Image (cartoon, grey):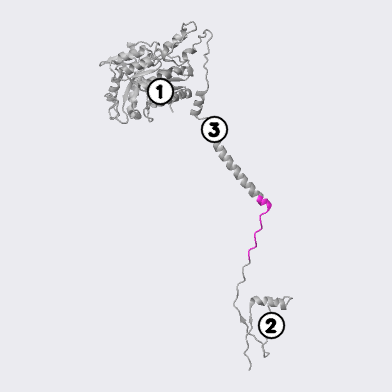
Amino acid sequence: MKLPKIPKLRLPFLKGRKDEAANPEGTGDEALDEISDDGTEEGVESQAPDIEPAAPEPSPSPKPGRWARIKRVLGLLGISLLALLVIGGTGGLFGWLYMNAEHTTARRDLLRPQLTVDILSEDETPRPNSSASASVPSDDNTAGGQSQAGNADGTQSAAADEKLDALAGGVLLNPIDPQLHEERDELILPIVGLDGRKVWTDYARPFDFDDRRPRLAIVIMNLGLDDSVTDMVLEMLPGQVTLSYSPYASDLAEKLERARADGHEVMIDLPMEPLAFPRDDPGPHTLLTSLSTVENLNRLEWVLGQAPGYVGVTTWMGSQFTTVEDAMMPVLESLKERGVLFLDSRDSSRSLASELASSIQVPRAFNNRFIDNPPSRGAIDRSMQDLELSAKQNDFAIGLARPLPITINRLAAWVPALEARGIAVAPVSAIADRQSIR
């Protein structure tokens, strides 16, 4: 029995290997027909489906060379150094800014010992040494809050007498001049004299304007309402302290004259509308933004006409009124026409009063710090120290305070010692138009 023929399968991937083995000469893919068992030529081949050749494996990337590794290390080192430079530079900049900040340099100057040497002219004789009078007074040798100083033989020198007189209020102010006032409707209003004299200079406390030391003015406000407190101020504070009286005080003319006799430069409180009005009410003659210009000027004249002898006005409250240009400008123009100094208490940081006064050349000054806000010993002492720093930094400073017993006591011990620390205690008139408006 003859078995059926089994067709031969030829696989393409095996064909090449067979051909290479059978034909080492490389005859290619030409294949002979297979011969069947009975000698006939087999012309049909079973073709296997084409199989895609496997993708070649990627060759491994070459390892970086030594130079590439060196460049990478150098790059990391450069970035690290740059970061250190940025951090160190930033820290150094902040440190430099802090060490050279205004408050830092001012505090450093305050702690540095200072010596003031007067340069004498050719015809001037040196004054005797009176450094003992600059020390802080004790309770058992004070008169009016001031110490007694003398020479070795027990007699006081002329310079010491002059200094003690000034501290005790012995400086003489110019008397009231009728040519600097007009009387109208029972009011005594200041005017510019025919010779050009003005009350803000004629009634000012004498001051040596050749003194190059930093100037600091202290102003006590709202005086005259409590007689016992007002007497305490006159008895304990030296004449360099400026006193501002309420226009509502009884017998105001007599009180102003007494203060002037003690050597104090005096001012009048000018009540103005605060932000919390009418909860906070400065009184019946307060200048209000809701009133007409005529009404406000009438109220201003009432305040100015209560008594003669003052150099200017101090804004009392006014945190609302001083921020409104249309309300402030007519008031300032009236003060200019009457030759009156204007002191802005700056009850509001938004006050425009000082800038407006400068724009029309009204003699002006402004408060740098409220001394007793809040009215505690620690806060008052810090405020006084800040005022010293401000005076040394800017050459001129003004501090305002209320007539509180704790404030009066602290000022009585502090003000006399300022002279020994190189600061001239000046009246407000000696600082007018000298503060820089920022």
Q: Is residue 9 left or right of residue 168?
A: right
Q: Position of residue 6 (x, y in %)?
A: 62, 86
Q: Which of marks 1 and 3 precedes in the sequence? A: 3
Alpha carbon distance from label 3 to label 1: 31 Å
Q: Quadrant of residue 141?
A: top left
Which residue corresponds to the image point at 64% horizontal and 48% vertical from the top-left?
Answer: 73
Viewer-side label of 3, 2: 3
Q: Residue furthest left?
A: 185
Q: Quadrant of residue 87?
A: top right
Which residue corresponds to the image point at 65% horizontal and 49% vertical from the top-left?
Answer: 71
The segment highlighted magenta reads 57-69
Q: Is residue 115 left or right of residue 75?
A: left
Residues 419 and 405: in front is: 405
Q: Which of marks 2 and 3 precedes in the sequence? A: 2
Instruction: Please tell me the numbered disc located at residue 337.
Output: none
Q: Residue furthest right?
A: 25
Alpha carbon distance from label 3 to label 2: 97 Å
Q: Position of residue 197 (x, y in %)?
A: 37, 14
> Is residue 22 shown in magenta?
no
- The answer to whether the residue labelled 2 contacts the one labelled 1, judged by CB atoms less than 8 Å apart, is no
Q: Amino acid at mark 1?
A: Gly
Residues 213 and 141: in front is: 141
Count of residue discs: 3
SS state under label 1: strand
Instruction: Please tell me the numbered disc located at residue 32.
Output: 2
Instruction: Please tell me the numbered disc located at residue 96.
Output: 3
Instruction: Please tell me the numbered disc located at residue 399.
Output: 1
Q: Which of marks 1 and 2 precedes in the sequence? A: 2
Q: Main secondary structure of the magenta part?
A: loop
Please tell me how crowded label 2 is: few (under 14), some (14-19), or many (20+) other residues with Cα within 10 Å: few
Viewer-side label of 2, 1: 1
SS state under label 3: helix
